Image: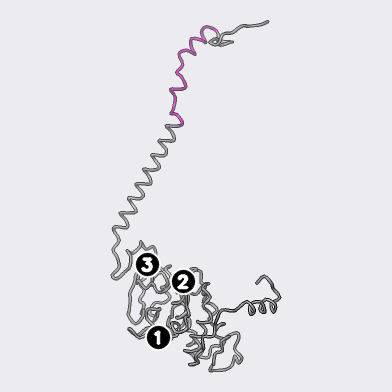
Amino acid sequence: MEHDFDETSRPGLNADEEALLGEMPSLQDVGVSRRTFLEQTAAAGLGFFALELLAQEEALAALRPSPGAASAESALANRVRVALRVNGATRVLELDSRVVLLDALRERLALTGTKKGCDQGQCGACTVLVDGRRVLSCLTLAASADGKEVTTIEGLANGDQLHPMQTAFIKYDAFQCGYCTPGQICSAVGMLEEARRGDTSHVAADVGATTTRLTDDEIRERMSGNICRCGAYPGIVAAIQEVHSGRQTAHTWRLVDEQQLARVREEDGDATV
């Protein structure tokens, strides 16, 4: 049997059901629309963010800057009192126990000559001297240097008189960009003191010798923890050697010509050099 229905008819409903359905509210009047929900959610999120930002600003504003500090003191969770003798002057700091010596020097004492390179103890740019021994300040807790003598690149010179190692670095052009230079110089000073104490190295000819006359290879090995991305190693070795032995190194570098370059390629067996 065929049934004809118009668009407004509801098949299967009797008159009472039709009346009941007509009395029910429209679904369009229930809840909120998707657009309204998203707008309200975004507004609430921005409101919480603004409240959190205001709370942080109030907390920072309440902090008192440490005397002579480069920036305001951060909120400390594990406060320790550390007395450092830095470049001949005693400096007392209140720090988080997890603060490393590098950050204490740069951010609290404004001694920015010590550089933050890899921050993982691999490049040597942060090298300073603690009680005369070279250390990587990015891996050294500031609290562990309490009561010790810390010497940074700023403390090597005596007023306007440069340290001999600084003078030698200038003489031999032992730097280019200069970023690694403070760590190189501090490391070189500490390394020569190690040699004077008789500390040996992997390439020493006599590991039992109490005094060491360093060869260029020994200097390279002992300085291998300090990386120069500019490649100024020949000048660095020459500068250290002069301070160590007084032996001056002639500047013999020059540009190679095509014939010399071809001979090098032939000797290396690599025509793509």
Secondary structure found at label 1: loop
Q: Which residues are magenta?
A: 14-34
Q: Residue furthest front?
A: 258
Residue 243 position within the rendered picture, expressed as x and y whole percent measured from the top left: 47, 89
Q: Quadrant of residue 95?
A: bottom left
User: Does the magenta segment cover residue 149?
Assistant: no
Q: Please tell me the numbered disc located at residue 163.
A: 1
Which residue is nearer to you in this view: 257 or 264?
Answer: 257
Q: How dense is the environment of label 3, judged by Cα within 10 Å: few (below 14), some, or many (20 and up)?
A: few
Q: Is residue 205 left or right of residue 120?
A: right
Residue 178 position within the rendered picture, expressed as x and y whole percent measured from the top left: 45, 74
- The image quadrant where one finds the N terminus is top right
How far, Cα to Cα, is label 3 from label 1?
A: 36 Å
Can you identify the residue that label 2 sits on? Answer: 138
Residue 208, compared with residue 176, is above or below; it is below
The amino acid at mark 1 is His
* Of the two numbered discs 2 and 1 in the rendering, the one whose residue sits closer to the viewer: 1
Q: How dense is the environment of label 1, judged by Cα within 10 Å: few (below 14), some, or many (20 and up)?
A: some
